[in-house]
Amino acid sequence: MNKLQTSFSKENGGRALLLFLLFLLAIYELIHAGFSNFAIICISPLLVLFVYAVFTWRMFAFWLLIFVNWFVMFKNINWHMPQSLPDEMLELLLIGVAIIDARTTPHFERAGNLMLLAIGIWCGFCCIEILNDTCGLGMNINAWFTGARLMALHLVWILLVFSLYITSPKILMTYLRIWAGLSLFSVFWTWKMINFGFTDAETSWLWSVGYVTHILNAGTLYRYWSTFSDAANYGCNAGSSAVAFLIFGITSKLKKDKFFFFITSAAVIWGMFQSGTRTAMFTMIAGFILFLALSRSVRILVPSAIIGAFFLCILMFTNIGNSNQQMRRMRSAFKRDEDASAKVRDVNKAAIAKYMKDAPWGIGIGIFSQDIPAWNKFKKLSEIPPDSEYVFIWVRTGPIGVTVFTCCMVLMLVGACRIVLFRLKNSTLIGIGGGMCSAFLAIQISGYANQVIYQYPNGLTFFGGLAIVYILPYLEKEWNKYEEERLAVEAEKKRLKLEKKLAKRV
């Protein structure tokens, strides 16, 4: 017995002592600092285990990031922390692991592309904005850093994470399936809202914040927001994602993938209509037109254009489906002269334009109404609803800033389109690249009418998608082999199925 105790003490004495010291520290914090510090000390071993898991299974934190990013705005989860914090912490952890982990060679060279240059220009401009004192209140470093971190630095983290961790065709395909699966869950949650009602958290938000924009037609029409922050965010994400899934389905060589992505696209389009976000239709149309330009295939171009034009004509020139309120609302997007919300936005933009004449650099990044005193003439400007991401950037950085931002977005999109057009040879990869470019264009157009570009989960989803396009040339050789193996497996299954069918006839 003594020998066993001695052996246990030698092997585990240090760990037992460390746990005992943590226990004493936790009790001390509970007595002197309260329950919060006590809880932090108690969960610290779990944090150590989490870091160990990340180093042991490097993709664990990446997949966790994808899931966390999707549910950051889900109203049924209370994170008890700033909503951007878990997302950014995981991104920085992933970058740190790639730098520290000596077992692998991180692919930092893959991030050296036109997208990084465009993001660098935008980050540089945002750094200059720290000197902006349009409101005459002096430099607010804390407000500037908070705003610049989300508007600029976050894009750097996204580019690095996707460049470092999408390293094989299998990982890429897994990412596309997880993205589709998460979108399908949002569709399911929309269906749940319609058929089973709202949860307590959703009901509380709807009647305290969302009732003006989400309950229409004297309470007979609801706009559903699923797992997102609001219906506009949901609809724009759904429209942009749906066009990507549709393109993946069109260009995939495997029947299983085709079926999966077509079903996903159809389901997500249904969810988009339940959001009542009319901008989403225009984003889908624009994204699909870009894909047709990038496809380089008459076999894809002609039937896709005909089918797309057919459905567009149904929406624009017929009354099919008008018995459904959501269909009538979506169809009203083509009648701008009857769109009351569009007229309100035009009035807001005209009012903002008057103030912006005296603010060529904007009121400052991170500056909001509570930061500006009542006597300041820019107080009113900060209170006018921006209604869209581009107007929000216009107000904060002025006409100079929104011009720089637009040029940077165009630059990174053009660079990605160039890769799809001239560097990729595999038709499936051309479809993946074209789908990502189309989705990125779609969310940018959405940002012209709604404040959605930087909303979760759009930043990681669509800027990350564009980052994938830039690394596709590095994966193409491996992808050809990976796809051939999957096609061979599919052909073998088909052969065996045919043999079994013929054997039954004998």
Image: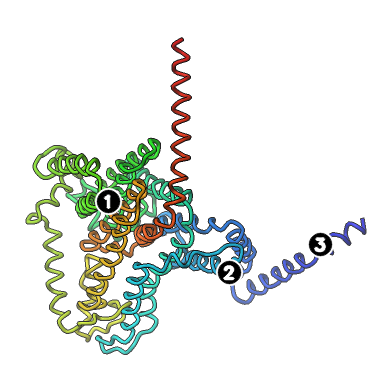
Q: Amino acid at mark 2?
A: Ile
Q: Amino acid at mark 1?
A: Gly
Q: Is residue 494 left or right of residue 395?
A: right
Using the rendered image of the protein, determine whether residue 215 is visible from the camera's viewpoint. Answer: no
Mark 1: secondary structure: helix
Residue at 59%, 68% in the rendered image:
40
Q: Quadrant of residue 379?
A: bottom left
Q: Residues within 10 Å of mark 3 (few under 14, many from 20)?
A: few
CA gap between label 1 and label 2 equals 39 Å
Residue at 25%, 51% in the rendered image:
291
Q: Amino acid at mark 3?
A: Glu
Q: Which residue is mark 3?
A: 11
- Where does the image place residue 464, in percent across and percent down from the top left? 38, 60
- Say which of marks 2 and 3 sits in front: 2
CA gap between label 2 and label 3 equals 28 Å
Q: Residues within 10 Å of mark 1 (few under 14, many from 20)?
A: many
**Residue 294 marker:** none
Q: Is residue 314 left or right of residue 499?
A: left
Q: Is residue 211 above or below residue 300?
A: below
Using the rendered image of the protein, determine whether residue 255 is visible from the camera's viewpoint. Answer: yes
Which mark is first along the chain, 3 or 2? 3
Q: Which residue is mark 2?
A: 100
Q: Which residue is mark 1?
A: 239
* Scheme of colours in the image: rainbow
Q: Residues within 10 Å of mark 2 (few under 14, many from 20)?
A: few
- Say which of marks 1 and 2 sits in front: 2
Residue at 37%, 52% in the rendered image:
227
Q: Nearer the viewer, residue 254 or 447?
A: 254
Q: Are marks 2 and 3 in contact (CB under 8 Å)?
A: no
- Where does the image place residue 201, in percent across and percent down from the top left? 39, 54
